Each structure stands twice: as structure tokens, then as C-alpha cells.
Image (tube, rainbow, N blue to C red):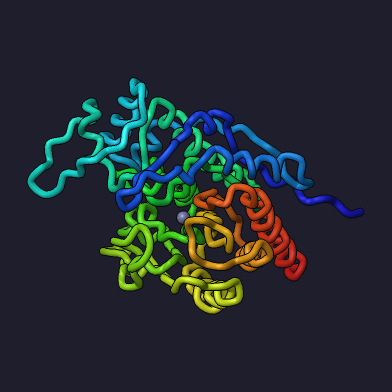
Amino acid sequence: MSTLPDPVRVWFHPDQLRFKPRYEWAFGERIDHPETTARAESILEALRDAPGFELSSPDPVEDGELRRLHAPGLLRLYESTRALDRDLYPTVFPKGEMVRADPDNLNHAGYWCFDAGTPLNAETWVAAAWSASAAASAASGILSGDRLAYSLSRPPGHHATRSRFGGYCYLNNAAVAASRLRRHGRVVVLDIDYHHGNGTQSLFYRDDRVLTVSIHGDPRVDFPYFAGFAEERGKGRGEGFNINLPLPIGVDGQEYQRVLRDVVAKQIAAFDPWAIVVAAGLDTYELDPVGKFTLKTDDLRRVGETIGSWGLPVVAVQEGGYHAPHLGLNARALLEGLRTGQASRTAAAK
Ligand SMILES: [Zn+2]
């Protein structure tokens, strides 16, 4: 008798769609904001009726759990933003001796922010909190025996540090998932977004139980510019447990696979984790308006197959990916690839 595998749960809350950033400032230009609600809608459309997927509503993540990752001042600032009647773009970013910061004063928002692309308004906090909650619930699914779970996290999270938001990210969703899994053993966060996961790196930089690996566009030419270099390897106990693999512009699916199979697979096997969080940015796609790699949909499927074949439970947490019309197809391809990879591993072990 053959049995179908359990459906992959897709964790998402409709209030994540309440936040609608309209524009951002990029090198002095006002441009349409790429992190639109159309992104999540594209993914929902692709997965809602697809065989093997099941939409699930997350439980709200507790404040205390967020406080273990993020500074109280940052979370207090988000509370303050609920009173906003407009979009707020911090424009003063204090450094050095300018250190007085009051999270109840929105004129001070720039203290907790590192760029001009990440606005705040009255809906930011509710959407970001549900986005983090989705990642937390996906991790809990793995703790209860799921082999693969997907958090449709939006807004994304991998650029958010302990005390600063930026890069369209407010709470570090992948780190929330990794922290839940970390209590049960060593965990890898593999960031496949086009951009370096500076926030995730910084949150686990001194941690030897979370190996952070990021494959991304060269930070000399792309966001976040100030982090993502190969020589950043962790500090203290965490020394050697952060791996950055910056790649040149134009990398294709074949080269990407080579890095995954020849470099990343070996590092992860040596670390011997019990689970993996994939910070699943899809802005490596050839048509992405922000990223500059040239992966096709089938390449993203193969990325999933390779990661799935490592035989670990996987929480995939959505990060970037800005070609909204194809984002759902690409998310589905990656997830189906992960499931196929995991199934081939199980079959081989029998
Ligand atoms: Zn990105």
C-alpha cells in the first residue's frame, strides 16, 4: 500500500498583508517599493490549491521570545509606530557621540535603523509580528515531527539585527525559527537570498550552536555593502561558525549548484546539525529587478533538491524575491525540490 507524504504546511496570517510600503529612497531617488503585498499574494496563489501544500494559521509569538533576539528599545519603537498617521522614513542616523535615543519619540527612529528603504507606519508592527510568528510556528511544526515546513514570511527578516531594522526587514524571522530549533541541538541557517544575511549573521556571530552560511552577491557592489565578506568568520565561541560565500554578478544555476554541492554541503556535514533553516530569498532569479544572478525556476527547484538530499528537517523562511508575477512559481519550485530531495534521501536509506 502506498501512502502520500504529509502535506507541507504553509504558515501565513492575512494581517501580514496590512503593511503596504509605497516607496523607498535609493541613492537619492524615490522609487516604488519592491516589497509589495503582491509578492505574498503570488505565493499564496501558487500554493493555495497546489497538491501537497496546506495553508496554516500561526500562533502569535510571545514578546519574551522576541526580546531574546531583539533589543527592548527596538520593540518599544515598533509599539510607538502604531500611532503613526503617515509613512515614516528615518533620515537622521546618529553615530558615535550622538547616542541619546528615546523609543517613544519617533523623531529618534533613525537610531534603530540603518537605511532609507525601510519605512514605518501604523501597520508595520502587526505585519512584522505575524511574519515572525509564522516562522516560529513553522519551527514548532518541525519540533512536532514535520520534515519540511514553509513560513510565508513577509515582511522579510534576514537584514534585521538585534537593535536595527533595514533592508525591508523589521524582525529576524529566520533567527526566530533557528532559536526555537537551537534548544534541541545544533542548527544551520543557510541563507540563499541574493543579499547577504547580515542580521542573521550578527545575531549568531558568537554562537557555536548555530552555523550561519550565506551565499550572496558581492557586498562590494550590492546591499548590505558593509557585511558579507569571506573573512567574517564569527567571534569568540562562534569563531569558525559563520561562512560567507560572496559570488560575482551574473552567477547562473550551474555555478550556484557547484557552490552548494562542493562547498556548503561539506561544511554542513562537518557541523552535523539536526535541522536546517533556509532563509529562502528568491531574488537570485534571472528576472528579479533587484538581484543580479541568473537562476531559472528549474535551477531553484534543483537548489531545493540538493538541500533536501542532505537528509535534515527543513524550515524554509521566505526572504526576498521581487519579481512578483513569478514569485509563487519559484517558491513552489523550491519547496517541491526540497520535498523531492528529502524523499530521495529517505528512499535511498531504506
Ligand atoms: Zn534579497
Q: Decide: is 128 above or below 241.
A: above
Please provide percent x and percent y for residue 302: 66, 67
Number of marks: 0
Please provide percent x and percent y for residue 106: 25, 29
Dividing the image into 4 quarters, which one contains the C terminus? bottom right
Q: Is residue 238 visible?
A: yes
Q: Is residue 277 visible?
A: no
Dividing the image into 4 quarters, which one contains the N terminus? bottom right
Farthest right residue in view: 1
Work out whether residue 263 or residue 39 is closer to the camera in this orientation and state it: 39
Quadrant in the rendering for residue 311? bottom right
Please provide percent x and percent y for residue 206: 30, 59
Q: Residue at x 26, y 64 (%)?
A: 236
Left or right: 58 as drawn, with respect to 120: right
Left or right: 296 as drawn, with respect to 72: right
Q: Residue at x 36, y 66 (%)?
A: 221
Q: Decide: is 303 above or below 173.
A: below
Farthest left residue in view: 97
Q: Residue at x 51, y 56 (%)?
A: 289
Farthest front residue in view: 29
Q: Residue at x 33, y 27 (%)?
A: 81
Left or right: 134 as drawn, with respect to 27: right
Please provide percent x and percent y for residue 322: 53, 50
